[in-house]
Image: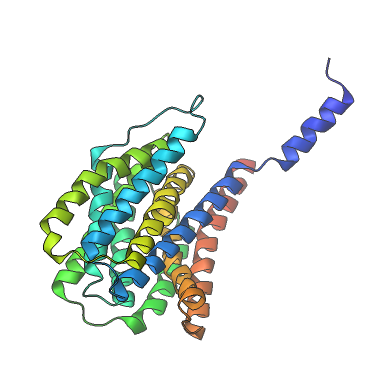
Amino acid sequence: MATDNDDERGMIISRSAPTPRFRVVVLTSIALAAFAGNSVLCRMALDSGTIDAAGFSTIRLACGAMALFLLLSTSDRKHVSKSKGSWVAASMLFLYAVAFSFAYISLDTGTGALILFGMVQATMITGALLEGDRPLAVEWTGWLLALAGFIYLMTPGVTAPSAIGAALMGLAGVGWGIYSLRGRRESDALGGTTYNFVRSVPLVLCVAIVGIEHLHLSPRGIVLAAVSGALTSGVGYAIWYAALRGLTAMQAAMVQLFVPVLAAAGGIVFLSEAVSTRLVISGLLILGGIGVAVIGKETLRRDAARV
């Protein structure tokens, strides 16, 4: 028979346990921070010439695969359905990682980010519409507000891009958009991400072999690529896959607009870049837009439920 103490204990556990929405917010925040950290590490490695693009991509994906496989082998998998990922998702991961690295050889940071996230938005929103998702007016309003903040942040750094660099970054955006869309259907975030990384390694090794005469490695470049692969890519992408299960495609596309703001903040902290009024204003616009879309939709849903 349940006692009063049992009831009180149950109430305490219920109040202290995180809600599914809170969990999604936390996972999404960690993933976005990882994406921004990855941008900073890539910029530090390639801009300083400590490693070539093919070498960075190869070490990044290989270290990501090893770190994730270690996590997978040491975690308790008894109550989680295992996933082997897919060659489609692995190919999109490979396409994103390699095209991203090679594009930044000929693009500046602002131009590259604008092309990349512009294509991510177009890919994910198109995918959402094709899947039958019909965003509400408040979601479109929030997205437009966040997009305006993103463009405001990036436009001063935009220069006329090289055709090859722009095409490569566009491919990177499409690859990441499709990879994220597929992640929404992944039942096992850690397992799926691990095997996607494992499958991507032979693909990226082919690129490294083709460009072996241009291979340039240094201890600093190797460390930056390894950290990018193991932490901000491997673990970060596994967390992103877990977060995607609680996000609509529209929301998943929108929240990624905040990555350049976080990356710029990372540049201030780690690369001694200056704080600008533009960064603050754009950050507020993007956060405000995300808030309008997400909170507005939740409010409308609660109001409809009361009727």
The residue nearer to you, when weighing 12 against 304, is 12
Q: Is residue 97 left or right of residue 68?
A: left
- What colour-coding does the image apply? rainbow
Q: Is residue 226 left or right of residue 137?
A: left
Q: Position of residue 224 (x, y in %)?
A: 38, 63
The residue nearer to you, when weighing 296 against 287, is 287
Q: Position of residue 136 (x, y in %)?
A: 45, 54
Q: Is residue 129 left or right of residue 11?
A: left
The residue nearer to you, when weighing 272 against 192, is 272
Q: Position of residue 197 (x, y in %)?
A: 31, 44
Q: Residue at x 74, y 41 (%)?
A: 15
Q: Residue at x 73, y 36 (%)?
A: 14
User: What is the quadrant of the N terminus in the image?
Assistant: top right
User: On the image, which quarter does residue 20 sit in?
Assistant: top right
Q: Residue at x 30, y 49 (%)?
A: 62
Q: Residue at x 48, y 71 (%)?
A: 266
Q: Is residue 241 above or below residue 287?
A: above
User: On the image, which quarter does residue 58 sit in?
Assistant: bottom left
User: What is the quadrant of the C terminus in the image?
Assistant: top right
Residue 307 in sight from this viewpoint: no
Q: Which residue is the extreme one toward the front? A: 219
